Image: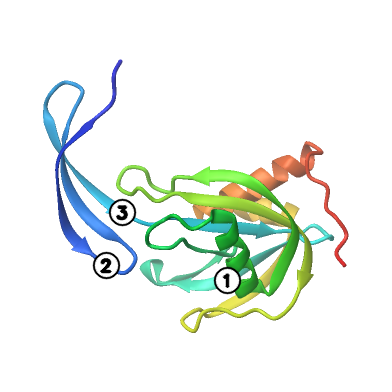
Amino acid sequence: MNTEEKQKSSQYIYKGAIINLRLDDAVLPNGKTAKREVIEHPGGVGVLPIDKNGDCLLVRQFRYPYMEETLEIPAGKRDKDGDSDPLACGKRELKEETGATAGHYISLGTLYPSPGYTDEVIYMYLATNLSFGKAQPDEDEFINLCRIPLEKAVEMVMNGQIPDSKTQAAILKADFLYKSGKLQLTNEE
């Protein structure tokens, strides 16, 4: 069965610093039309750093839309034009938020956080062979660094203590790689 929809028309409702909102008319596979609200977002990158002891470096920060603190992997958005290198963005965010740099990165793939209404794509990486310097968060970022053993982080995902989707996906993928023997933690300098 054909499920493809085609854009018939598009109108921007809002253009902002981080997102744009547009209202489209889409032609459905049966020939009828439907309205589609689309949030355009440049995308983001998240990095799960794991040290030689098997501890995940996560950041706790206040998230205004939920009016609560969340525990997340270090992450940030890509440039507005979306063409910045995802790994370079991830390295920048890791250094800014944790002070860490990594000697080894593994791609954990991409995540579509909410494909029903946004085109956002999050690129995820696992970082190992860590060395540490001073964190340099943006002036509007207030972050607390937390070290949590990977096994405990998996428990926290499974019992609902980590609701962030990119963090859940990265932790569960890293745990799979570790348990399958595809991930070996390397000694830090």
Q: Could you say whether the residue bearing mark 2 is in a helix, strand or loop?
A: loop
**Residue where numbered disc 2 is placed:** 16
> Mark 2 and mark 3: span between their CA atoms?
10 Å
**Residue where numbered disc 1 is placed:** 60
Eye-nearest disc, 2 or 1: 2
Amino acid carrying label 3: it is Glu
Q: Quadrant of the N terminus?
A: top left
Of mark 2 and mark 3, the one earlier in the sequence is 2
Eye-nearest disc, 1 or 3: 3
**Residue where numbered disc 3 is placed:** 40
> Mark 1 and mark 3: span between their CA atoms?
26 Å
Q: Is residue 174 visible?
A: yes
- Quarter assignment of residue 96: bottom right
Q: Residues within 10 Å of mark 1 (few under 14, many from 20)?
A: some
Q: Position of residue 43 (x, y in %)?
A: 43, 55
Q: Position of residue 3 (x, y in %)?
A: 29, 24
- Quarter assignment of residue 72: bottom right
Q: Position of residue 141 (x, y in %)?
A: 50, 78
Of mark 1 and mark 3, the one earlier in the sequence is 3
Question: Which residue is depicted at the point 59% across and 65% down?
Answer: 74
Please state which of residues 144 and 157 is positioned toward the viewer in this rendering.
144
